[in-house]
Image (cartoon, rainbow, N blue to C red):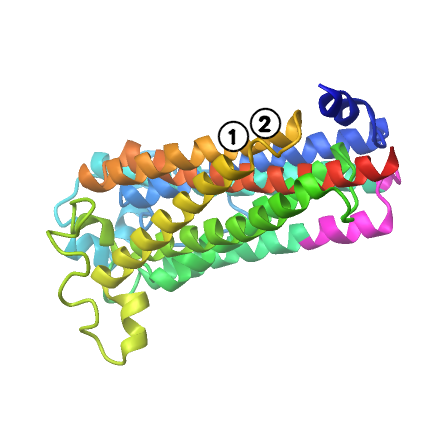
Amino acid sequence: MQYMTTFATSGPRPSPVRRAIGVWLLVCCAAVFTMVVLGGVTRLTRSGLSMVEWQPLSILPPLNTAQWQETFAKYQQFPEYHLRNAGMTLAEFKGIFWLEYIHRLWGRTIGLIFFVPFAWFVVRRAIDRPLGLRLAGIFLLGGMQGLMGWLMVKSGLVDRPEVSQYRLTAHLALAVLVYGAMLWVGLDLLAPRQPRSGAAAVDGLRRGALALVGLVFLTMMSGGFVAGLKAGLGYNTFPLMNGEFIPDGVMAMTPVLVNFFENPATVQFDHRMLAETTGILIIAMWLWRRRAAPAGRVRLALDAFGIMAVVQLGLGIATLLLVVPVGLAATHQAGALVLLTLGIWLIHETMAYAQQRQDT
């Protein structure tokens, strides 16, 4: 109780303006979170190649029959139609078009959600230079993420109607980095902290959480390669891969390094190992550090991180055993981002706690 009272009442309080900026950034985080999940659903439903042009300033869909016919005719010129959807009707085309359209429109909406308040805060001189540079960097990173999205789509508009797993993973990585950066800055504005040592109860916890968040990110990136290669559609058994710990063909490609990025068996094996290792280590840290963790938000963040690791492991196993159903696979992807969020929150809370203990 003493720790809880100290943590709740001590430490600097943000000004109303900085609190408003922090809340705005968390709203942006929610928008990016939605975007990542929507992108996953678009990929899982094979809707991502339905829009064959990149028109970043265009927001209107086809509005009449003639425009729909023209859009469909453009789609029919590309390999996906001939190799996967030959004979598709206009009504069926609309079914995949709308999901990709919403995905792209939401990306542009996020740009407005970020840029318009940012410009307003700048005009009102509510943002100092260091914060302004960080926010400008996030905006630039978001623009790069949008460009990478088109480069990803473009890779599937050639001979083979499959996007590059390298570009898909880069697209995901940039989205996660934008999300993580906004979350961290938002938390900094709402709960100011300074990274100092001196609180033994949280020093080890902070170091462990930093390493585990890195592992969560790495596992998410390996999931990008699983998605790009559709590696989850094979070896749908657990804990072994069709009766083997290491399946045949894991190192079938040459040079050997290529297997880790282009061999579906190897990519799924790597993702399994990373996911299991990350989940087990998070749960172990949770059980080991929980008693020593101070009561209040630090312990709450640790509990949430540990519980979500259990949930995410369950979602991953279920997704694999049920052969990647769309709803469950999208939930698994969302779960990964929730787990990353909780890890970042835990790191921030330990740093805030360490600072507040020194100030009291």
Residue 105 visible at all: no
Q: Is residue 327 left or right of residue 216?
A: left
Q: Position of residue 154 (x, y in %)?
A: 38, 61
Q: Dot 1 lies on which element? A: helix
Does 259 sit above or below residue 230?
A: below
Q: Amino acid at mark 2?
A: Leu
The residue depicted at 30 percent of the width and 51 percent of the height is 272
Label 2 neighbour load within 10 Å: few <14, some 14-19, many 20+? some
The residue depicted at 18 percent of the width and 56 percent of the height is 245
Q: Which residue is mark 1?
A: 304
Q: Is residue 134 magenta?
A: yes
**SS assignment for the magenta stretch, majority:** helix
Quadrant of residue 184 in the image? top right
Does 179 sit above or below residue 296?
A: below
Start and end of the magenta stretch? 123-137
Which quadrant is the N terminus positioned in? top right
Q: Is residue 93 left or right of residue 53?
A: left
The residue depicted at 27 percent of the width and 67 percent of the height is 262
| Residue placed most toward the observer, 151 or 38 | 38
Q: Amino acid at mark 1?
A: Ala
Q: Position of residue 2 (x, y in %)?
A: 75, 21
Q: Are marks 1 and 2 in contact (CB under 8 Å)?
A: yes
| Alpha carbon separation for disc pair 1 and 2 | 6 Å
Q: Position of residue 258 (x, y in %)?
A: 30, 73
In the picture, the disc for residue 341 is none
Q: Is residue 87 left or right of residue 349?
A: left
Q: Dot 2 lies on which element? A: helix
Q: Is residue 195 magenta?
A: no
Quadrant of residue 119 in the image? top right
Q: Which residue is mark 2?
A: 300
